[in-house]
């Protein structure tokens, strides 16, 4: 079984310091959390950025500042910015960060109901445009999937040329699709040979889904974006603590942890410049 890639989603766009004081907003705080996750074993830093007051933003200059700060403490990590931004942002706002030349970025293959009137819209034309522009900018998409239909849509976009093989998926479980091993296996079973995948379980489902993914040969995402607790009623003090727990689970199940350069090879990313 190949080595385990751990992604740390260190801040997200919605969680707040009121929920957990360790949630990072400032550049310095994002750097601190990236460092903790990287040193604990994360190969990929999944990055949203905030203004200093916690307001989510897709401002390119803010992303550039934060990415530079992350590279100072995690020089070989894969920085994976989000093109999701926050509910209500325009397509152009969400895509600005891909102008900075990241190795990877997210591509949501459908719209999502987050509760109440909060709907994250991704039209057919939006997805096609994102896929086309990411190819032009040599950015590998991590295909974000919130239900099985999004897998089928992504496979269709690949056939149309908007997404290239080998594809990489992130299954986000606990929003629209219940976080169960059965649902995860159902989604994974639809993937073509040579595809890689990660699972993100929200809230209390984070570590059960991580354990399932590790056992099934997939990869894992943890972090404050998805879950603020180390265990029931115990707030995590850092993203590093969440990554450390995954590393321990992986050790028990016999999976070695991938370095960033090993993650690049697994994901079919080009080697770092100078390597």
Image: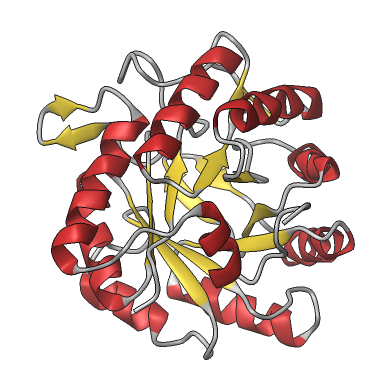
Numbered disc total: 0
- Residue at 44% x, 26% y is 33
Residue 184 coordinates in the image, percent (x, y): 32, 73
Q: Residue furthest left?
A: 232
Residue 34 coordinates in the image, percent (x, y): 49, 31
| In the displayed structure image, the side of residue 146 where residue 133 appears, left or right | right
Residue 95 coordinates in the image, percent (x, y): 78, 45
Q: Is residue 259 visible?
A: yes
Residue 264 coordinates in the image, percent (x, y): 60, 62
| In the displayed structure image, the side of residue 28 where residue 147 appears, left or right | left
Q: From what the image shows, is residue 190 above or below residue 62?
A: below
Nearest the eye: 13 or 81: 81
Q: Residue furthest right?
A: 136
Nearest the eye: 88 or 273: 273
Q: Residue furthest top?
A: 53
Q: Residue furthest bottom?
A: 193
- Residue at 85% x, 59% y is 133
- Residue at 25% x, 60% y is 209
Quarter of the image where the N terminus is located: bottom left
Question: Would you identify the image quadrant in which residue 228 lies?
Answer: top left
Question: Would you identify the image quadrant in which residue 51 lies?
Answer: top right
| In the displayed structure image, the side of residue 166 where residue 125 appears, left or right | right
């Amino acid at each position: 079984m190949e080595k385990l890639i751990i992604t740390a989603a260190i801040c997200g766009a919605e969680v707040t310091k009121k929920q957990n004081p360790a949630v990072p907003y400032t550049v310095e705080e994002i750097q601190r959390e990236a460092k903790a996750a990287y040193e604990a074993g994360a190969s990929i830093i999944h990055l949203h950025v905030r203004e200093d007051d916690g307001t989510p933003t897709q401002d390119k200059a803010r992303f550039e500042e934060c990415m530079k700060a992350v590279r100072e403490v995690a020089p070989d990590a894969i920085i994976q910015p989000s093109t999701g931004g926050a509910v209500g942002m325009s397509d152009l706002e969400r895509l600005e960060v891909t102008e900075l030349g990241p190795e990877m970025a997210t591509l949501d293959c459908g719209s999502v109901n987050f509760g109440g009137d909060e709907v994250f819209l991704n039209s057919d034309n939006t997805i096609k445009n994102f896929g086309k522009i990411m190819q032009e900018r040599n950015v590998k998409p991590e295909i974000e999937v919130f239900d099985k239909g999004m897998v089928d849509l992504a496979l269709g976009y690949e056939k149309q040329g908007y997404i290239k093989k080998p594809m990489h998926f992130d299954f986000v479980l606990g929003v629209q699709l219940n976080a169960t091993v059965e649902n995860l296996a159902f989604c994974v079973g639809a993937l073509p040979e040579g595809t890689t995948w990660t699972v993100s379980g929200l809230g209390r489902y984070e570590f059960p889904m991580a354990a399932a993914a590790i056992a099934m040969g997939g990869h894992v995402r943890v972090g404050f974006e998805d879950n603020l607790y180390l265990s029931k009623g115990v707030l995590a003090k850092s993203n590093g603590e969440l990554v450390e727990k995954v590393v321990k689970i992986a050790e028990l199940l016999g999976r070695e942890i991938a370095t960033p350069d090993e993650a690049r090879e697994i994901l079919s990313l080009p080697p770092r410049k100078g390597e």
